[in-house]
Image (tube, coloured by chain):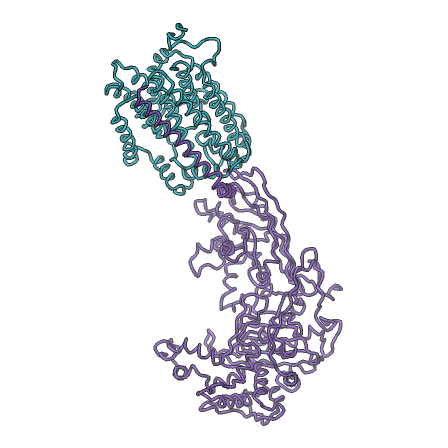
Chain colours: A purple, B cyan
């Protein structure tokens, strides 16, 4: 071998050795340095998690009666990955299926579309889950029909029928509770993204509204996971992990199912009566609260919907109706999302303002038919002059002009339009004592914040709307170009940032720009009743595990006090009692065997309905009972319901009848919901079979 | 002693032992690869075949048969007389060329993965003439470049052209299949043989440049088929073709990586048992080693290849005549580049080409050729010690 060949050979040897050493290095990197990463990747390729959803915990009322439970249903599901592979994208299969299930094909088609596939505004009823999840068409299929589907898999490719646990709201005692309870549904991509800080599995259900979403983390439990190892053809080769599902915890509420049903019935009745007198009555809400504990005993909203319809499978029309104006937006929980001017129910606050301002509550004040404020005339309710009234009587008959006068005088004292440096603002401050304009913080989702139309709000409002009012003829629509509105716009442009005399006067009787939710009013009246405590109300009382252990007790928090002297509150309660004796609700409560107190509110609403008619008044009644040792605050509101007394006070009376066991003009102590005089404090035993006390005999 | 010293260096092997003259280290290393390879082929196929109701030992049995035939061929190659080998080489070469011509004729061959490389034989067997062509090219070139009619240290241009001609005809036919992996390996062998033969550097450098240019032109002008371009692209961006070759490469890397340091244990690799890597008993056999034997096991396999190749370099260096050196060089380059290409592809260092892993992949023709190559090394070792 010559020298050059020898060198070449050495060169080749070094080259080849380095190639193989490079392989060794790469191998080390893949297996040792990056090994864990590839192990994870391999696991995600090989393993499939078979998720067995946990049984959801029950939601029960304060005596253990189930408001929400689970039952076994038969789900008919559509597998999009399979039907999409057909030439007509599964249209024929879905048509056959619709016929078999007696459903509308367009509905079924819509409900098997992913929400992302549809244009904006045409998404009603769409599937919020993923393409890879079986989409349930119904969860309560007839077993005969389900059998047909399973047996004719050639005719129904990608369609399956399987037994599943479904959420059921049994409606015991005739209760609906849709807004309170909410409903469950499939996870959205947002839920799955983990953005909420929780991790879910595709096949799980999640609370979508009401208590179901509020306490979802307790109710849902932990799903069972069986991890199977699959091969390239998705055939299972082994099982690597198998954890059993842990059932969800139960939720005990302070709701009494009978009272809840009664409140719902009272609402429906109030709406019916209001409509009979020609009012649209487009919505209503009722809240019953224990003023001593801050717990909610009943909370209802009207119109309502069937909470079971989601599991049955909503039709597209049903899904649309939930949010449509024409059907009254049943999805809206008006008890905590509806905002309305409080009207005369606000006079309880005004009375405290007058006391703060130094007015002698024991004196008498003139109640003329109208009062002139600058150039404007403010009429008493129905322009009736009442002569001179004691403050108590003025509250009873709901005189407006007394408040106009006091509010106007105080407004002038504060400097009128040229506000002095530190205005007294007795009325705004009295409202502030009740934290008006804040949420109550009740443990239900999506509560609305009220609006306290004080000086700060007015300034903020002006900076936002200045442009609109100062260029009104350019910005407003044609329909808005009436002489009155143009004049109003001119005024708003000039001094819309200031509290004007009219604003101050309106504020004192709960009119104008101040709006409030029914639950907020209940919280305020509870403070009047309990000596001044502002409760953060609660619906839930406790989380109880499946084996009966109390996991968490939920109690209302004191979030403030109104800081009003007991004597003033006592006077106020007395005045509110007078309302039921000689005042606006005297007729309604005539002969009622339990002494109650309350305040009517008939709040004017500006604007027009879709059909052009002027909007009817908001009918309020805020009450408490009994007068001695008061405890139960009840607020009932009917939007566009007419008079507070005839529409809403009647409803409250019905609620109290149920609560106290009133039969005609007497009390049947056995029929009373809380024979011990207060709602149960002990947590009940939880069983799906529990029925309301007293109903066993039937 | 003198009689021994002047004995014909090309004497026949002594009859007393068939193993006499075998290099023990080389033999043990190859033997270990064959054993490990057999276990891996079995591991790669048993579960899948059993799960699909087939004989789980189908591939194992055939692999053992292939090895047995291959070992007989190796033994034959080791003990064969050099002159006989010289006589047979042209026949082997002609047979190889005929076979390569045959496979590219339309309608007579079976196409596997886009390449026409196999001649179907009765009984479900197939033969891959390109594998046998490697041997005839290496032996043929080595003969032409070592048996010079003059005394010069360097082969003449004439010698070089003849040697290149021996390589060029089969290479062009293999290009037509197309089987770029084999072309790459043969080219490496050709350049290596030429370099060691003492051919002028301009030839070696020129050939290297030609090979690179050829590769570029072939890709650009579409001589390389679509599926090969795809394979190259998926090498550059493994996510480009997630269902095709990119999928295979990514799966291969995941499978190897998931083995970690110790592996999952033989027969216990979930990736292997789930057959997520296609062709895992043939071209991707190293993924099975990676997953089930871990870095310790698969690193040991690479170590065995290093051992074999370094041992072969030793044989080449100790060889007393140019022929032995050139044959060794050719076989070394072949084994080295085929091993590098195969494992490199599995580990994501090289683009995907369908070349088997020497001594380990399932496949008769390749196993025969590898063991004949092994036999050639032993032949040189036994007979040409300086």
Q: Please tell me whether residue A159 is drawn above or below residue A477 in the rendered image.
A: above
User: Which quarter of the figure has residue B220?
Assistant: top left
In this view, the residue in front, A527 or B201, is B201
Whether residue A73 is visible: no
Q: Is residue B190 above or below residue A445?
A: above
A380 and A316: which one is in front? A380
At x 61% / y 73%, what residue is drawn? A269
Which quadrant holds the N terminus of chain A? Answer: top left
Report the number of discs: 0
For the C terminus of chain A, the quadrant is: bottom right
**Which residue is more in the foreground, A30 or A570?**
A30
- Left or right position of A22 against A411: left
Residue drawn at the location 28% of the way across and 27% of the way down: B204
Residue farthest left in this picture: B157
Task: Measuring from the top left, give residue A567's x and y in whole percent.
Answer: 65, 85
Q: Position of residue A653 (x, y in %)?
A: 65, 77
Quadrant in which residue B320 is drawn:
top left
Q: Is residue A107 left or right of residue B170?
A: right
Q: Position of residue B289 (x, y in %)?
A: 49, 32
> Looking at the image, which is closer to me, A260 or A109?
A260
Image x and y of residue A196, in percent? 52, 58
Residue furthest top in the image: B3
Q: Is residue A455 visible?
A: yes
């Amino acid at each position: 071998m010559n020298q050059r060949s020898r060198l070449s050979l050495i060169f080749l040897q070094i080259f080849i050795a380095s190639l193989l050493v490079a392989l060794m290095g790469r191998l080390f990197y893949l297996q040792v340095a990056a090994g864990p990463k590839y192990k994870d990747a391999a696991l995600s390729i090989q393993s499939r998690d078979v998720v067995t959803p946990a049984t959801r915990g029950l939601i029960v009322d304060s005596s253990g009666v189930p408001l929400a439970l689970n039952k076994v249903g038969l789900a008919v599901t559509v597998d999009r990955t399979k039907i999409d592979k057909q030439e007509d994208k599964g249209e024929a299969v879905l048509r056959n299926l619709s016929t078999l299930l007696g459903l509308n094909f367009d509905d079924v088609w819509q409900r098997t579309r992913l929400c992302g596939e549809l244009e904006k505004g045409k998404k009603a009823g769409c599937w919020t889950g993923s393409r890879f999840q079986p989409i349930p068409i119904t969860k309560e299929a007839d077993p005969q029909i389900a059998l047909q589907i399973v047996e004719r898999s050639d005719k129904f490719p990608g369609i399956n029928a399987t037994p599943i646990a479904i959420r059921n709201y049994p409606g015991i005692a005739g209760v609906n509770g849709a807004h309170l309870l909410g409903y469950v549904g499939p996870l959205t991509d947002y839920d799955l993204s983990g953005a909420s800080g929780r991790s879910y599995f595709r096949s799980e259900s999640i609370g979508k509204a009401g208590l179901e979403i509020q306490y979802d983390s307790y109710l849902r439990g932990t799903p069972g996971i069986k991890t199977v190892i699959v091969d390239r053809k998705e055939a299972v080769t082994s099982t690597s992990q198998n954890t059993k599902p842990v059932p969800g915890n139960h939720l005990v509420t302070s709701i009494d199912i009978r009272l809840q049903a009664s409140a719902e019935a009272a609402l429906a009745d109030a709406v019916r009566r209001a409509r009979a007198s020609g009012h649209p009555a487009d919505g209503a809400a009722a809240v019953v609260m224990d003023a001593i504990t801050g717990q909610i005993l009943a909370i209802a909203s009207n119109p309502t919907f069937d909470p079971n319809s989601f599991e049955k499978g909503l039709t597209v029309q049903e899904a649309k109706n939930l949010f449509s104006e024409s059907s009254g937006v049943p999805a809206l929980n008006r008890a905590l999302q509806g905002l309305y001017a409080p009207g005369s129910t606000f006079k309880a606050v005004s009375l405290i303002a007058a006391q703060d301002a130094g007015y002698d509550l024991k004196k008498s004040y003139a109640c003329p038919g109208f009062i002139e404020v600058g150039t404007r005339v403010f009429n008493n309710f129905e322009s009736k002059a009442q002569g001179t009234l004691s403050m108590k009587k003025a509250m009873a008959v709901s005189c407006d002009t007394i408040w106009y006068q006091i509010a106007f005088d105080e407004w002038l004292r504060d400097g009128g339009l040229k506000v002095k440096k530190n205005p007294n603002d007795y009325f705004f401050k009295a409202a502030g004592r009740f934290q008006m304009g804040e949420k109550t913080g009740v443990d239900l989702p999506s509560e609305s914040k009220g609006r306290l139309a004080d000086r700060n709000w007015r300034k903020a409002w002006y900076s936002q709307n200045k442009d609109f009012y100062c260029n009104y003829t350019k910005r407003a629509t044609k329909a808005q170009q009436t002489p009155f509105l143009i004049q109003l716009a001119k005024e708003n442009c000039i001094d819309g940032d200031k509290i004007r005399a009219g604003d101050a006067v309106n504020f004192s009787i709960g009119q104008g720009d101040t709006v409030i939710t029914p639950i907020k009013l209940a919280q305020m009246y509870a403070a009047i009743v309990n000596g001044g405590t502002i409760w953060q109300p609660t619906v839930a009382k406790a989380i109880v595990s499946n084996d009966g252990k109390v996991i968490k007790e939920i109690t209302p928090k004191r979030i403030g006090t109104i800081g009003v002297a007991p004597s003033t509150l006592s006077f106020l309660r007395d005045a509110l009692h007078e309302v039921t004796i000689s005042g606006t609700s005297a007729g309604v409560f005539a002969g009622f065997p339990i002494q109650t107190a309350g305040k009517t509110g008939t709040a004017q609403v500006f604007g027009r309905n879709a059909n052009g008619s002027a909007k009817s008044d908001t009918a309020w009644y805020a009450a408490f009972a009994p007068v001695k040792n008061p405890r139960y605050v009840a607020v009932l509101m009917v939007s566009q319901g007419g008079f507070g007394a005839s529409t809403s006070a009647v409803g409250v009376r019905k609620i109290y009848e149920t609560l106290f066991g009133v039969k005609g003009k007497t009390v049947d102590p056995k029929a009373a919901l809380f024979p011990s005089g207060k709602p149960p404090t002990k947590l009940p035993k939880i069983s799906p079979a529990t029925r309301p006390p007293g109903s066993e005999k039937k | 002693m003198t009689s021994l010293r002047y004995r014909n260096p090309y004497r026949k092997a002594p009859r007393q032992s068939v193993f006499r003259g075998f290099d023990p280290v080389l033999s043990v290393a190859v033997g270990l690869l064959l054993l490990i390879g057999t276990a891996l082929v079995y591991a790669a196929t048993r579960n899948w075949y059993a799960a699909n109701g087939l004989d789980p030992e189908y591939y194992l049995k055939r692999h053992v048969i292939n090895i047995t035939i291959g070992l007989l061929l190796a033994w034959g190659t080791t003990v064969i007389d050099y002159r006989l080998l010289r006589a047979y080489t042209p026949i082997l070469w002609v047979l190889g060329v005929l076979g390569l011509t045959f496979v590219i004729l339309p309608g007579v061959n079976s196409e596997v993965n886009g390449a026409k490389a196999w001649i179907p034989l009765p009984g479900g067997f197939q033969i891959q003439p390109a594998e046998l062509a490697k041997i005839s090219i290496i032996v043929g070139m080595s003969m032409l470049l070592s048996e010079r009619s003059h005394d010069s240290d360097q082969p003449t241009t004439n010698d070089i052209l003849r040697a290149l001609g021996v390589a060029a005809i089969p290479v062009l036919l293999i290009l037509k299949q197309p089987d770029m992996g084999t072309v790459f390996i043969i080219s490496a062998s050709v350049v290596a043989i030429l370099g060691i033969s003492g051919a002028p550097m301009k030839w070696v450098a020129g050939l290297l440049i030609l090979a690179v240019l050829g590769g570029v032109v072939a890709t650009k002008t579409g001589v390389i088929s679509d599926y090969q371009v795809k394979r190259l692209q998926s090498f550059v961006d493994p996510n480009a073709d997630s269902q095709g070759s990119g999928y295979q490469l990514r799966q291969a890397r995941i499978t190897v990586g998931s083995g970690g340091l110790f592996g999952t244990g033989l027969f216990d690799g979930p990736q292997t048992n789930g057959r997520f890597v296609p062709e895992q008993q043939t071209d991707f056999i190293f993924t099975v080693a990676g997953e089930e034997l871990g870095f310790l096991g698969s690193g040991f396999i690479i170590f065995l290849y290093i051992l074999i190749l370094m041992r072969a370099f030793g044989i080449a260096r100790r060889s007393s005549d140019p022929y032995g050196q050139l044959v060794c060089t050719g076989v070394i380059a072949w084994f080295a580049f085929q091993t590098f290409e195969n494992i490199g592809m599995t580990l994501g260092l090289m683009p995907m080409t369908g070349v088997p892993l020497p001594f380990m992949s399932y496949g008769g023709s390749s196993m025969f050729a590898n063991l004949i190559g092994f036999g050639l090394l032993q032949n040189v070792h036994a007979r040409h010690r300086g």
